[in-house]
Image (cartoon, grey):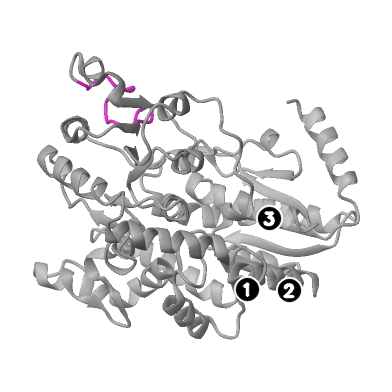
């Protein structure tokens, strides 16, 4: 779309939304952060707010404005040469928190100068701590969205204070010790950082904590019955800031009709709860030997499986070149390997009996909402905390272990899939599914929390 056409489309959209209170949303440009922010935008749009999304143009961007015609989009750009040369995710977010101050200030100034809508608030990802100063400058209330669960957020915020005890622990026993005031989590459930990079994450988390305490409110993609103790701790930590647990976000939105995707015709041919769905999210990578161990573990388990292998997910490979010759032919109809799958719809399919997941929060909450038990293989970030809650607090899944070995993989798949009928794990995950369904209905905790958030935004 040309600049002129984009401007014309923007003007039409803004004229259509004239008179509605505007909510500005500013996501982090990773799919796991952008998707829940877009879900929140859809929820607020359904409550008669005008929605403006400020998105960052980077090599990481997966956001396509044309897919969201009800929203107005404004773009800002960092220094591409510098961002492309940064190695890790934490270093990149730290850099963007410096680089984007002026672009965001300019963008917000333009929005404030328009007369179409009154601005109700600026909702930003928790990682954009710099946005608090921009919001203060223009007298706009900033609401923080934490796209992960509440328990992992508390564990991450505790990390800088725990650093003297956590840097290079002297023995394995130290890693097994519970965290002070967070007994469900252990030191080993925190993100792994080496001595060279831990100062980046400590600085980032300290800034997130300070600026979240300075914000006007916090939103979580979780619900009360899932994390009551952590929610109470969060209320105490951030008092008097109001907290709105609205999750599961995606449950507020209708499930799309079964898409035209090859996985569905294949799933339709399988018995109920017979298929293991395998996906490791949008960022995790595998070494070639790990890829082979997964492939043979799946094949040897004898269970049907749907496996998402992203292009370039395996180091040094474009897609499936590392599979042994004839592997797919050997599997026949028992296995299907795809580059992408509509995950929410796949998990809702009656043929799915288990989910081998990296335990990103979006995947975790989507799985429990469909009553699908999980095989957990966390890779980085808050995934270890999520996996700990799945396996030891909610007890709706099993942990694979630290290494990928075909014999262990086969054994753990068999263990998980044995639960799919009426095992204890299945009973517990179905109970959480029912609670997730109930919380968004009239009178439920997330239904009421959303109503309170709407009133909070309107009462400027």
Quick one: 302 or 125, which is closer to the camera? 302
The crowd level at tag 2 (other Cα within 10 Å; few <14, some 14-19, many 20+) is some
Precedes in sequence: disc 3 or disc 1: 3
Q: Label 1 to label 2, Cα distance in Å?
A: 9 Å
332 shown above or below 146: above
| Quarter in which the C terminus is drawn | bottom right
Asked if the residues shown at circle 1 and circle 2 are in contact, with their CB atoms under 8 angstroms apart, the answer is yes
Precedes in sequence: disc 3 or disc 2: 3
Residue 277 x/y as whole percent: 35, 39
Q: Mark 2 points at which residue?
A: 456
248 shown above or below 4: below
Looking at the rendered structure, the secondary structure element under dot 2 is helix
Looking at the rendered structure, the secondary structure element under dot 3 is helix
Q: Is residue 410 visible?
A: yes
Q: Label 3 to label 2, Cα distance in Å?
A: 15 Å
Q: Mark 3 points at which residue?
A: 43
**Quarter where residue 340 is shown:** top left
Which label sits in the foreground, 1 or 2? 2
The crowd level at tag 3 (other Cα within 10 Å; few <14, some 14-19, many 20+) is some
Q: Is residue 237 magenta?
A: no
Q: Label 3 to label 1, Cα distance in Å?
A: 17 Å
Asked if the residues shown at circle 3 and circle 2 are in contact, with their CB atoms under 8 angstroms apart, the answer is no
**Quarter where residue 152 is shown:** bottom left
Residue 456 x/y as whole percent: 73, 73
Q: In this view, does 176 lie to the left or right of 130?
A: left
Seen at 23% across and 48% down, the residue is 418
Which label sits in the foreground, 3 or 1? 3
What residue range appears in magenta? 308-323
Quick one: 346 or 115, which is closer to the camera? 346
Q: Name the residue under label 1.
A: 217
Looking at the rendered structure, the secondary structure element under dot 1 is strand
**Quarter where residue 454 is shown:** bottom right
């Amino acid at each position: 779309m040309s600049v002129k056409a984009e401007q014309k489309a923007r003007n039409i959209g803004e004229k259509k939304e004239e008179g509605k209170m505007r909510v500005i949303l500013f996501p982090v440009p990773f799919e796991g952060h952008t998707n829940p922010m877009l879900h929140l935008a859809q929820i607020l749009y359904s409550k008669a707010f005008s929605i403006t999304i400020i998105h960052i143009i980077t090599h990481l961007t997966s956001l396509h404005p044309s897919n969201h015609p009800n929203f107005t989009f404004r773009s800002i750009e960092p220094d591409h040469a510098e961002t492309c040369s940064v190695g890790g995710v934490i270093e990149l977010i730290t850099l963007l928190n410096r680089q984007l101050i002026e672009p965001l200030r300019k963008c917000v100034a333009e929005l404030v100068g328009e007369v179409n809508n009154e601005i109700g608030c600026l909702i930003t990802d928790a990682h954009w701590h710099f946005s608090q100063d921009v919001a203060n400058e223009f007298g706009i209330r900033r609401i923080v969205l934490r796209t992960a669960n509440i328990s992992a957020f508390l564990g991450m915020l505790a990390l800088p204070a725990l650093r003297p005890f956590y840097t290079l622990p002297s023995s394995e026993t130290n890693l097994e010790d519970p965290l002070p005031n967070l007994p469900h989590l252990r030191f080993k459930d925190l993100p792994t950082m080496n001595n060279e990079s831990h100062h980046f994450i400590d600085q980032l988390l300290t800034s997130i904590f300070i600026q979240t305490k300075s914000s006007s409110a916090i939103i979580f993609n979780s619900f009360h019955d899932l994390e009551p103790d952590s929610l109470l701790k969060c209320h105490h930590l951030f008092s008097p800031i109001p907290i709105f647990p609205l999750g599961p976000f995606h449950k507020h939105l209708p499930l799309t009709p079964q898409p035209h995707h090859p996985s569905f015709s294949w799933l339709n041919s399988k018995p109920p709860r017979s298929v293991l769905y395998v996906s490791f999210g949008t960022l995790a990578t595998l070494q070639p030997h790990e890829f082979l161990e997964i492939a043979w573990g799946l094949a040897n388990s004898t269970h049907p499986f749907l496996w998402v292998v992203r292009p370039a997910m395996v180091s040094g490979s474009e897609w499936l070149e590392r599979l042994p010759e004839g592997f797919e032919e050997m599997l026949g109809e028992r296995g299907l390997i795809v580059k992408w799958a509509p995950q929410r719809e796949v998990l809702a399919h009656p043929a799915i009996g288990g989910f081998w997941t990296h335990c990103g929060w979006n995947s975790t909450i989507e799985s429990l909402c469909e009553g699908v038990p999980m095989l957990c293989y966390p890779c980085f970030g808050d995934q270890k905390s999520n996996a700990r809650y799945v396996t030891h607090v909610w007890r709706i899944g099993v942990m694979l272990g630290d290494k990928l070995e075909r014999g262990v993989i086969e054994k753990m798949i068999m263990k998980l899939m044995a639960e799919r009928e009426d095992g204890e794990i299945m009973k517990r995950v179905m109970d959480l599914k029912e609670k997730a369904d109930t919380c968004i209905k009239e009178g439920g905790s997330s239904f009421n929390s959303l109503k309170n958030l709407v009133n909070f935004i309107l009462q400027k």
